Amino acid sequence: MMDRKEQILQVARREGRVMVEDLALTFGVSAHTIRRDINTLCEEAKLRRLHGGAEYIEGQANLPYHARAVLNFDEKNAIARAVARVIPDEATVFISIGTTPAIVAGALAGKRALTVITNNLNAAFALSETAGNRIILPGGELRLPDRDLLSPEAVELFSTYRADFAIYGVGGIDSDGSLLDFHASEVQMREQMRMNARRSILVADRSKFGRRAAAVGGRLNEADMLVLDHAPETTFTPLLDDYDGTLVLAMETTDI
């Protein structure tokens, strides 16, 4: 029979994260016991601590899209609202792949006459209900279940437009400020967006700091604006101290 820690890891792998109180009820043990199990799994680099629980991080493969979509959902919505406050009507906007950029797109639904260039089909759907918007998508094969396009046509598309804003996420942020993703094509696409935008906005919840991924390209301090939910753990404080762009902690302020 699988021991409790293995069962906790299995739940985390399936759902993206686990919460202490939920696990205590599931296994009929105390919250203290569950925390001890989670601490052990974190020490083994199989989970990463979150407030009230932990997320699954084993290996360098990304979580399934459905798990990422609900992970840190409130934090991502706060980030999305903060970004929406700086995007005016009639702007031209690049939007990258990922769950946070897709949620940002939903927050932009109230804007008027946007031109949106994106390889994120979820973002395109979120903005398609506004009749005055113009949405431009690349060709190529659709990657499922993420619903994004990482084709050569997508790189070419972003190289032929100049946007007012580029809104992009990342798979992880390393301790030296390097930006990480899970495939080289994701890095290539993100960097093309950033370079062809007048103002670049990096969106990330704090769980991305220290998260591992294999492909590297771009740096945190190249973004004109950094929108986080909260400040990351103190290990990463020097990165923010050295950052000279606009920093927004979306769950700690209402003003930009």
Image (spheres, grey):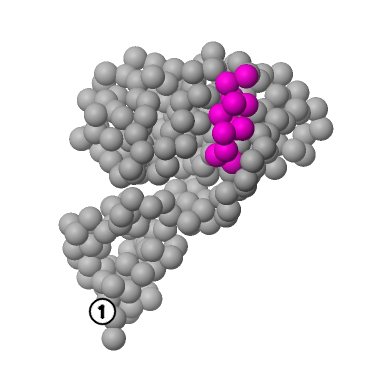
The residue depicted at 61 percent of the width and 16 percent of the height is 162
Residue 249 visible in rendering = yes
The residue depicted at 66 percent of the width and 19 percent of the height is 91
Predominant SS along the magenta part? helix
Q: Where the N terminus falls, by quadrant? A: bottom left
Q: Position of residue 52 (x, y in %)?
A: 33, 56
**Residue 180, picture quadrant:** top left
Q: Position of residue 230 (x, y in %)?
A: 37, 36
Q: Position of residue 14 (x, y in %)?
A: 43, 65
Furthest toward the bottom, the residue is: 1
User: What are the residue bounds of the magenta stretch?
Assistant: 149-160
Residue 109 visible in rendering = no
In this rendered view, identify the residue nearer to me: 253 or 240.
240
The residue depicted at 46 percent of the width and 26 percent of the height is 191
* Residue 58, placed above or below residue 246: below
Furthest toward the front, the residue is: 152
* Residue 102, placed above or below residue 179: below
